[in-house]
Amino acid sequence: MEKNNRFIGILSGIVAAICYGTNPLGALFLYQEGVNTHTVLGHRFSLAAILVGILMLFRKEHFRVTKRELVILISLGLLFAASSMSLYSSFHYMDAGIASTLLFVYPLMVALIMSLFFREKLTLATLLSIALAFLGIALLNKTGDGATLNTTGVLLVMLSSLTYAVYIVIINQTKIKMSPFKMNFYVLIFCLVGIIAHSFFSPDTHIQVLPSARAWGFAMLLAIMPTFMALILLTVSIRNVGSTPAAIMGALEPLTAVLIGVLVFHEQFSSRLAWGILLVLGGVMLIIVGKDWRWKQIREALRRR
C-alpha cells in the first residue's frame, strides 16, 4: 500500500510539474492579445474554479468548511495568487523561459523551511538531487553567457518562488482533511479574490473582457493545464510523498518551458540545453529512487567491503 501511494505521489508530482510548466504558453499569447496580467490571472482562476465546482457537483461533494479550514484555505489562496501575480508580472521584464528556470529555486526554499522550522532532515539524496537540478537549470538559463538579468524581474521571480514554497509547506504541515477538489475549489476562489483586490490598487490594470475567441481559448488552456490539473495533482503528490520531494520534481516545470520554447517558438536547441535537460531529469530521478533506507544500504555495503 505504501509503495502504491508513493508511486501515485511521484506520478502526480511529475504530471503536475509538466502542467504547471505550460504557464508561459497561455500567458504570452494572451499578452499578445493586449490584455494585462490581472485579466490573464482573473480569467485563469475564475474558469478553473468553475471547472472544479462542476466536478464537485458531479461527484456530489458538499461545499461546507469549518472555521479552521477556512483560515487555511484563505492563506493558501492568497499565497498562490501572490506567487502567480509575481511570476506573470516577471514575464514583462524577462523572457518567460528564463523566469520559469529561475522559479525553480523554490524546492531549495521548501527544503530549507522544512529543515529550519520543522526539523526535517536534509538527506544525501535530497542534497544531491537539488545540486543536479540546479546545475541543469544553470545550463538551461539562456543568459549563462554573462548577460545581466533585469533586477525587477529577478526579484519578482524570487517572491513568486518564496510564496509558492510556503504554499507547499502549509499544505504538508496543516494536513487539512478534505478532497483535493474541494480544497482547490476554495484556493481558486480566494486566488480570484486576491487578484481582484490587487487590481483596485494598481493603476490602469483593471480586469478586462477578453477580446476574442482566441483569447478565450488560451484562457481556458491556463485554467485547465497549469491550474485545474496542476493544483489537484500537486496536492495528491504532497500528501503521498511530502513537500520536499514534490517540490524537487518541479524541476520538470522549467524543462517544459524550454521545450515549449523550442517546439512552439522555434528557439534553437543546443548541446547546452541537452545537457541541462539530462541533469534536471537526473535530479528528478534521484529524488524518486533516493529514499533514506537505500542510502543506508549503500553505506552498509561499502563498509562490508
Image (cartoon, rainbow, N blue to C red):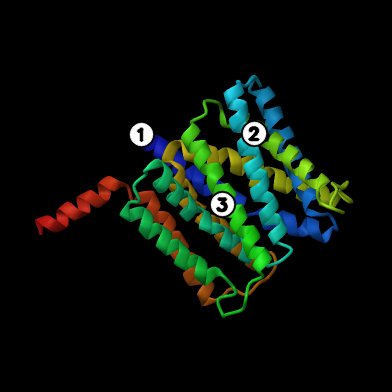
Q: Which mark identifies residue 265?
A: none
Where is residue 235 drawn, in percent x and y? 53, 38
Secondary structure beneath disc 3? helix
* Distance from Cα at disc 1 to Cα at disc 2: 31 Å
Identified by mark 2, the residue type is: Ile
Where is residue 288 drawn, in percent x and y? 39, 50
Q: Earlier in the sequence, mark 3 or mark 1?
A: 1
Where is residue 136 drawn, in percent x and y? 47, 66
Identified by mark 1, the residue type is: Glu
Identified by mark 3, the residue type is: Leu
- Residue drawn at (47%, 71%), measured in percent from left and top? 275
Label 1 belongs to which residue?
2
42 or 22: nearer the eye?
42
Q: Earlier in the sequence, mark 2 or mark 3?
A: 2
Secondary structure beneath disc 2? helix
Question: In the shown orientation, is residue 300 left or right of residue 93?
Answer: left
Label 2 belongs to which residue?
74
Classed neighbour count for the residue bearing mark 3: other residues with Cα under 10 Å, few (<14), some (14–19), many (≥20)? many
